[in-house]
Image: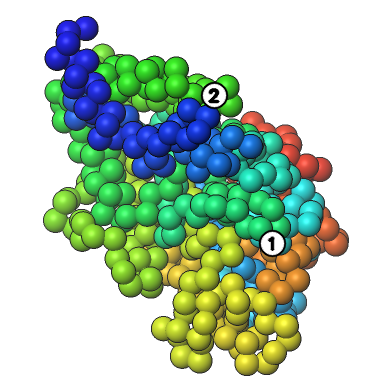
Amino acid sequence: MSHQSKTNRSDRYRGDCELQSDRNSRTAINRRTILRGSGAALALPWLEAMLPTQLATGAETESQDNGQPIRMAALFVPNGVRPDCWTPRNEGKAFELSETLSPLQSVKDDLLVFSNLWNQASNVGDGHYVKTSGFLTCTTINKSLGIDLNCNGQSMDQVAAKHSGTQTPIPSLELGIDPVTTGVDTNVGYTRVYGSHIAWAGPTSPLARELNPRLVFERLFRATNPKASSANRDTLLLDRVLEDAKELHNRLGTADRQRMDEYLQSVRSIEQRLQTEKDGTRSWEPLTKISMENAPSSEKPDDFPQHVRLMLDMIALAFQTDSTRVCTFMFGNAVSGRNFSFLDGVSGGHHDTSHHQGNELTLAAYKKINQWHVSQYAYLLEKLKSMKEGDRSVLDNSMILYGSGLRDGNAHSPHDLPIVVGGRAGGRLNTGQHLRYSSDTPLANLYTGMLQAFGCDTERFADSTGVLPGLLA
């Protein structure tokens, strides 16, 4: 390597890897670090080396009926719900939506509402973090200040993504509103990072979320408008990015090296798709085209309701174009203090409101926040239902999970979780029902059934004991 090349590499690292030395000569990598190679860029996964130094030391998925792809999304809401206003009246097909669920009336026949599901693995002392990072894994996360971050499993969305990811340009989309929360919650002794992730590629690999709808749109645009001559160039740029990754690898500790190895495995899947394009065997085509004329503003919205709607629009667009078939979205991080004063009769933060202590005024505000979240979910389902695919809709060919990792925010209980699924998964889900099960039926039984409906050869997920009766058509 020439002296000039070494200088450029050094300059690039000074620009992208902000380092700080501690008294033990260890370094901390800025969490915004990216790998660059002559214009290519890849964001890093979460690494221990990004911790503050003082802590660092311590197959196809096609419908059998209409040939359309099946999609899956999981929408997470922090801080639970007001339980006495959640559960529908009656069971089976004759159910009536509760007041909180009333915004879903127009899609009632496309719904499955569940009662008495629980996540046993999250039934430990922590109030929120175990129930957030364990929401889609159904595992117990390590109690950690951040040094040994580990969920001890893989989230069910990533099981699905592994099944369908080679069929689309984007294996999965992870979206959110709030940036990753750092530091330690001294009340419970957990790193706040756990509260920022529901999607896990592996036990030590939480997936970074995109927070800017414009960047999501641009990613979808690139996926649906590939340049015919781009494969060779992109392969070359990826090679240069991987050179940077190897150099960084040598500066990491053992646990971080494992995370980087897992991360680079996913990068290698990109290489495989690029090779397919270069060989001229790329068979995927977008179901609809995307125009940059419809792109959101380049700035991340300051207005929370607008921000949420734009991110839900990105999910709908991704599914409509078949750019990806798997997506997760977090309305907020665990212990979110989001101010909902834009709603009449609501003041203060979401988390504080969820700790209602039985106060009638606070309970009324809590219900309004819950109902607002459900109305956003209804917006997405209605949007997907308006997107036609042959004699069906995108919603007909989707499963959109909505829920929280605890029921009553005041009690922090993982019993009888508030869980809804919208969409028929190509006719594989028996929708239009309120299904009540015996007390403490595993949430993982729902996930097992959803994975089967998605086309995965999954007999068991986490602590599942089978598929929920009545779930599959």
The residue indicated by pointer 2 is 253
Using the image, determine if residue 263 lies above or below residue 114: above
Q: Going 62% across and 57% down the picture, which residue do you hit?
A: 185
Seen in the image, is 429 located left or right of residue 423?
right
Asked if one can make out residue 231 in the rendered structure from this viewpoint, the answer is no
Q: Where's residue 433, x and y in %?
A: 67, 66
Mark 2 or mark 1, which is nearer the start of the sequence? 1
User: Which residue occupies the foreground of this view, 374 or 211?
Assistant: 211
Q: Which quarter of the picture shows residue 195? A: bottom right
Q: Going 68% across and 71% down the picture, which residue do you hit?
A: 409
Circle 1/circle 2 CB separation < 8 Å: no
As drawn, the label of residue 187 is 1
Using the image, determine if residue 216 lies above or below residue 423: above
As drawn, the label of residue 343 is none
Q: Where's residue 426, x and y in %?
A: 52, 48
Q: Where's residue 130, x and y in %?
A: 68, 52
